[in-house]
Image (cartoon, rainbow, N blue to C red):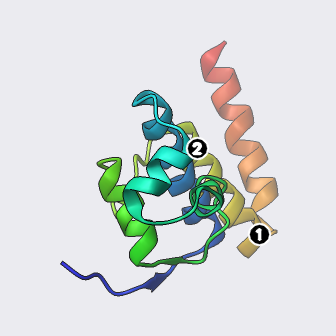
Amino acid sequence: MCKMARRIGSGEAVEIGLRVKRARVARGMTLKQVAARCGGDHTQVSKIERGKFSSLNAYVHKVCNELQIDPASADEASPQALHARLDRLIREKPAAASALHAVFDALDRLAN
């Protein structure tokens, strides 16, 4: 199945990249092994893992398929996904930072 390339934000790219790296390492594969199986170069896989891509293109889909990852379904509760979401929120709405500090303070009080 051929998938159309879809532009994504940097936060989503970082989150997908972290999931790609986790899956690759869990399978004991090197960057070069993944790249060879996907018909590319290890530098391309490295860029994906570092979130240095701006669209879900055919090669990103090949890498995700090879590692059995669905790039469209993020683990919303993962620390990486939460970090990416917070980063995106602060970048897009800087005024939200003070509200987030209040939320973190409240969570700290609950935890203690």
Q: Residue 36 vs residue 31: left or right? A: left
Amino acid type indicated by mark 1: Arg
| Residue contact between numbered discs 2 and 1, judged by CB atoms under 8 Å | no
Q: What SS does tag 1 mark?
A: helix
First in sequence, mark 2 or 1: give its number: 2
The residue that appears at 64% across and 48% down in the rendered structure is: 83
Residue 35 image position (x, y, % from top left): 49, 56
Residue sitting at x 53%, y 43%: 21
Q: Which residue is mark 1?
A: 91
- For badge 2, the amino acid type reads Gln
For disc 2, the marked residue is 80
Q: Where in the figure is residue 61, as x and y percent of width and height?
A: 37, 67
Q: Within 10 angstroms of label 2, few (less than 14), some, or many (20 or more) residues?
A: some
Split into 4 quadrants, where in the image is the C terminus? top right
- Check disc 2 and report its element: helix, strand or loop: helix
Q: Residue at x 42, y 65 (%)?
A: 39
Residue in the image at 47% along x and 45% along y: 33
111 or 65: nearer the viewer: 65
- Name the side, left or right, on which 35 lies relative to 102: left
Crowd rating for badge 1 (residues with CA inside 10 Å; few <14, some 14–19, many 20+): few
Classify 38 as above or below 81.
below
